[in-house]
Amino acid sequence: MQSNAKLQPLLSPDSIAIIGASRNPGKLGHVLVANLIRAGYKGKLYPVNPAGGEILGLPVISSIEQLPSEPDLAIIALPREQVLGTMHQLAAARVRAISIISAGFRETGRDGFELEMAMAELARRKNILLLGPNSLGLINTDCGLDATIAQASPAKGSIAFFSQSGALCSAILDWADGESFGFSKFLSLGNKAGLSEADVLEALGDDTNTKVIIGYLESVDDGEKFLRKARMVTEKKPVIMIKAGTTQAGARATSSHTGSMAGAVEASTAAFQQAGIIQVNDLESLFDLARAFSEQPLPQGPNLTVVTNSGGPGILAADACESVGLHLARPAQKTLDILTEALPPFASIYNPIDIIGDASAERYRTTLNAVADDEYTDAILVLLTPTASAEIEETAQALIDMAKKCAKPIFACFMGEQRIGTGRDMLLAAGIPCYNYPEPAVRAIEAMHAHYRWQNRPYPVEVCFRRDKGKAERIITKARAVGLKELPFHDAMEMAMAYELPVPENRFVRTSDQAVRAAKKLGYPVALKIVSPHIANRGDVGGVALDIHAPHELRQAWFSITTRAQRKRPDAYLTGCLVQTMGPTKAREVVVRFTQDPQFGPLISFSLAGPAAEMLGDISYRLAPLTLQDAQEIVREIQSIPLLRGARGAEPVSLTAIEDILLSMSQMATDFPEIQEAELNPILVDAEGALVTDLRLTIG
């Protein structure tokens, strides 16, 4: 065992005490002992039960105090009420790690929550590794350790799995047993009162017997720690995750399941993306990708060559390539010459390479050897449909033989069921991923190439913008002292200036006469905007007038917007209006926001202004702090980016100016976690730069 030394007593213990061991085969304490023996655990086992006697040939110790030595790991399978007292006894016995199978803690309500917090505090104070409670247990196939209550034990493999759901672990172990799918490590986190997903991820990242890490998460307790650890691990090996609780119904189920709070789906998606974690939406994709990553090298380019004996599946593969951003490689001239000479006249030598329905295994072998040597091919996908003349097992063997001498990743798709079963089994046994349909095969190849790009990306450039943090602190302190939840507009604009955001000149006024004098000093044209601590969105009450060119227009605008605001919001106190210089006339309007996610902290979003962006979901997200690369990517990810780049002959805007604003807001969000929400809407941007015309800041 070469994994993180801090978790050695848990993952590779020299001795184990089973507290609550039982002679009754229907009890969890009996299943634990039986699984440890069946898996071939070579360390010392100490079943503990006051009744004494013998369990499966092992002498039973009547109490923790009578343990002959200090066990590395203790497994507790007792009623909830006995767990905390047992932990105190184990701490006195100098146990280094505890796995708690028992359930009924924070997921059941206040009493269970308080009991779990007491257990967690004891583990911290005594420096005990704590797994659970409400855990299925753990498995380490490297040392024959199966400390779970599951009915199935996995084969040895190079994939590590961890999950917050114990029942899901049981189902996956049963599935893996039927599919001969092997694991290196298998951990059920339970309620995570002690060890978190970040701790386990770090240990598995250091484990030399683990090539791929996969997991199921419902919540993340310390988002910053998780991101930091995940970035380090994904530099070394792929991490593939399912994040549950991404809908309102799922979030409610998450809370009732483990007592955890689920954050925004956008935050978890951004977190995974920024940490290099590959996120999937279903278990089938999770294990498809795990198998591919564990058995094949990473494609070093996006160019895929498809070899098929049927035109239809080849077209499906081509469509799938375009949908995920892969390219169908154009074979080199040398490859084309070989294929022209070797294949029948009706074959298609261009990609997809269709060697037609009567293709023999030898025709596959000749084609694959040519493709394997092709300089423009980064990965190979072999499709086979069970035509009348198909030599399925022989073709599978040809593919296996070629894979042994080919350094490029190779994938197969043998379509059908009855006739191709043996050939598919041959490929899987040889470490060649074989799929039922072309689309999941192409998605796996794309995910592996994306991970290659991640591991070879440029070093992230961190940016710290100049700001007057002292001035910003004084503004927030003043607002909190008088109980404001939202900064007044003029204070919000002062915050913008403290962070050197580009803002137009403006004057706060209380009467129309003051507005006219202010406009004369600023210069026409101007905008007029309602200022009220009770009106969050001025547009909802018609509280904005734009492009005012003369004093009489300004007075009329004053009367109109104040009257509308009072009629629509009679409860709102109008403190006055803001006179503001107009921005550039041909500017585009964009929006930058951030909110505080309960799990991952400040979540920054970017979109075009207007309801269409939100209704259509054309919004991109990243977590603060942003790197320069994050700022560049968040701007360019929206579907409507062509509108900013100058579609249909329009002048392109300054994307750099938008990036600067994003980086400044990232700095503000990081400096002041008490700012719960901020919105810059709209930001006017043209070829010359950007202008923040409105800013809302909500304080927690």
Image (tube, grey):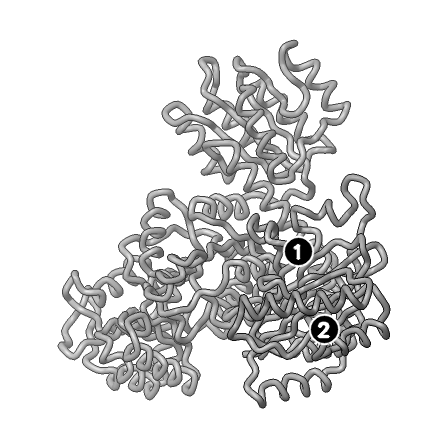
Q: Label 1, secondary structure: give it.
A: loop
Q: Residue at x 43, y 56 (%)?
A: 247
Q: Residue at x 76, y 23 (%)?
A: 334
Q: Residue at x 70, y 78 (%)?
A: 490
> What is the quadrant of the C terminus in the image?
bottom right
Residue kind at label 1, given as amino acid type: Ala
Q: Is residue 200 above or below residue 430?
A: below
Which residue in the protein does label 2 denote?
578
Q: Is residue 266 visible?
A: yes
Q: Quadrant of residue 27?
A: bottom left
Q: Along the line of sight, which residue is nearer the eye, 221 or 304?
A: 221
Which residue in the protein does label 1 denote?
609
Residue kind at label 2, given as amino acid type: Leu
The picture places residue 137, in percent across and down from the top left corner, at 34, 65
Q: Label 2, secondary structure: give it.
A: strand
649 sits left or right of 643 in the view: right
561 sits left or right of 177 in the view: right
Q: Along the line of sight, which residue is nearer the eye, 654 or 629?
A: 654
The picture places residue 474, in percent across and down from the top left corner, at 68, 87
Measure how far apart labels 2 and 1 are at the Cα level: 21 Å
Q: Quadrant of residue 442?
A: top right
Q: Quadrant of residue 563?
A: bottom right
Q: Is residue 153 above or below residue 463?
A: above
Res. 336 mark: none
